[in-house]
Amino acid sequence: MESTFHANAEPKVDTIALDGPAASGKSTVGERLAERLGFLFFDTGVMYRAVTLAVLEAGLDVGDEEACTKLAEAIQIDVRPPSQADGRLNDVLIDGLDRTWEIRSPQVDGNVSVVSAYPGVRRALSVKQRAIGMRGQVVMAGRDIGTVVLPEARLKVYLDAPVEERARRRHIERMERGEPSDYEEVLAGLKVRDEIDSTRDVAPLCAADDAEVIDSDRLDVDAVYEKILSLAEERGLV
């Protein structure tokens, strides 16, 4: 697909674009790769989650595109290395407050795809994401990194798995954190999210033409990690 930013305008940067649907393992593998390479791990989805949480807490209608866009433009979002050993990959601060786990709530899960589909919201956050990626030495995880945000990434990977497997992983993840979880509800939520993400008009979820596609259905985390690490070595990132 055509990128918002033009790949030919910039040379390749030493960043890994790691795209794929919800619960495909991007964060788990991405964090491990970043640690191995000495790169920053940046899950761009936390920005959309932060905006969604702020929209809900402000009592705004998630169906109000203009209101969501204005809030996305005004909100201060900071992503920092983890300050606590509670399973978090980063600290996510909204207007200076640690909201790392609040952005993972079921309420945010159920609304983030609606908010993130708005062109204004995506424009506001994509510029911030791109600025971070262009510094280099970043593993950026998201849904449109290789296609829209950073087409100059030296390595692009699209990580996929059947929705049933992804729902199982998300269900287990929540239970391990001591949160209530129902597999069928998680599955239904992911199906809705996949539909919204893949059919939105702006930056729909899809693999970049030059992305390496990895189906993790029958692969464990170690195998996926080794595959991507090997690709990184081929690209001179190790």
Image (spheres, grey):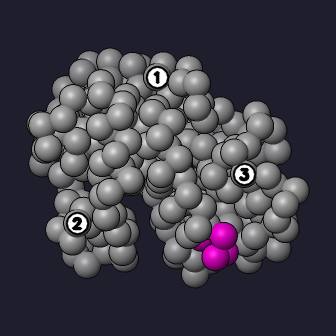
Tag count in the figure? 3
- Reading the chain from its start, which is encountered first: label 3 or label 1? 3
| Location of mark 1 (residue) | 196
Q: What's the residue at 73%, 60% (across, down)?
A: 153
* Left-right relation of 42 to 92: right
Residue 232 in percent (x, y) is at 75, 65
Residue 5 numbered mark, or none:
3
Residue 165 in percent (x, y) is at 44, 29
Q: Which residues are magenta?
A: 134-138
Secondary element under disc 3, as helix, strand or loop, is: loop
| Location of mark 2 (residue) | 95
Disc 3 residue crowd, few under 14, some 14–19, many 20+, Cα 10 Å: some
Q: CA distance from mark 3 to mark 1?
A: 23 Å
User: Could you tell me if residue 234 is visible in this image?
Assistant: yes
Which quarter of the image is occupied by the N terminus?
A: top right
What secondary structure prevails in the magenta region? Answer: loop
Q: Is residue 90 magenta?
A: no
Identify the amino acid type marked 3: Phe
Q: CA distance from mark 2 to mark 1?
A: 28 Å
Disc 3 to disc 1: CB gap under 8 Å: no
* Left-right relation of 142 to 187: right
